[in-house]
Amino acid sequence: MSVATERRIRRDNIVPIKEKGGKLVTAEEQARDPRRGYTLGLMLIDHTINQRQHDAGVKFAEAMARFHGLTGVPLPNPRAQNLFAVRGNEGDESESKVDAAKNARRRYNEARDVLLSVGHIDEGRHVIHAVTEVAYLENMHARRWPEHMLWYIRRGLNRLADHYGD
């Protein structure tokens, strides 16, 4: 834990701060915040997105991970591939696993369609790309994207929040 904490302090240039009540928050306490471990959490800390958008992004990432995990569809990130892993089955899948995979595919398709429906078709493509990069592929560079790209992210996360009922 101490190694990760020190790395976060160096990477994010965390310094002690005083909260509104006058309480001093050390750099170590700030670095232990679990939101600092993923891109959406960092964007929430930076106030680039709000809590509602963050929660929608987390749900989207969970739906994507479940879809890729249950259906066997390769992850969209080539760095995440294990080319030496061979998966197979004995030819008889359990009904519950098949149903779970169908439900995961349905939720994935619904989320994808919601993001693609934002604005016109080209805008929808930008939105799904931006949200996937941030929420699922954990692209840390997205925190520094220009404002028009952050606008796509916020717009997509707002639409997902409406879809999820948050």
Image (cartoon, helix red, strand yellow):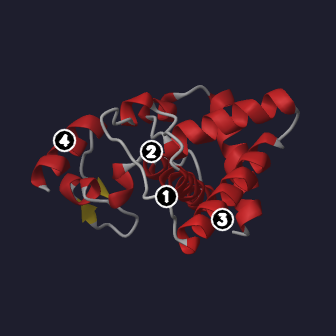
Residue drawn at (59%, 61%), measured in percent from left and top? 101
Mark whose residue sits in front, 3 or 2: 3
- What residue sits right under mark 3 in the picture? 103
Q: Secondary structure at mark 1?
A: loop
- What residue sits right under mark 1 in the picture? 91
Marks 3 and 2, the one that precedes in the sequence: 2
Amino acid bearing label 3? Asn
Q: Which mark is residue 162?
A: none
Marks 1 and 2, the one that precedes in the sequence: 2
Place of residue 57 in the rendered image (x, y in percent of width and height, measured from the top left): 58, 54
* Residue contact at pointers 3 and 1, CB within 8 angstroms: no
Amino acid bearing label 4? Arg
Left or right placement of residue 59 versus residue 108 in this view: left
Q: Secondary structure at mark 4?
A: helix
* Residue contact at pointers 4 and 2, CB within 8 angstroms: no
Place of residue 148 in the rendered image (x, y in percent of width and height, measured from the top left): 68, 28
- 10 Å crowding of disc 4: few (<14), some (14-19), many (20+): few
* Residue contact at pointers 4 and 3, CB within 8 angstroms: no
Q: Secondary structure at mark 3?
A: helix
Quarter of the image with the N terminus is bottom left
- What residue sits right under mark 2 in the picture? 39
Q: Which mark is residue 7?
A: 4
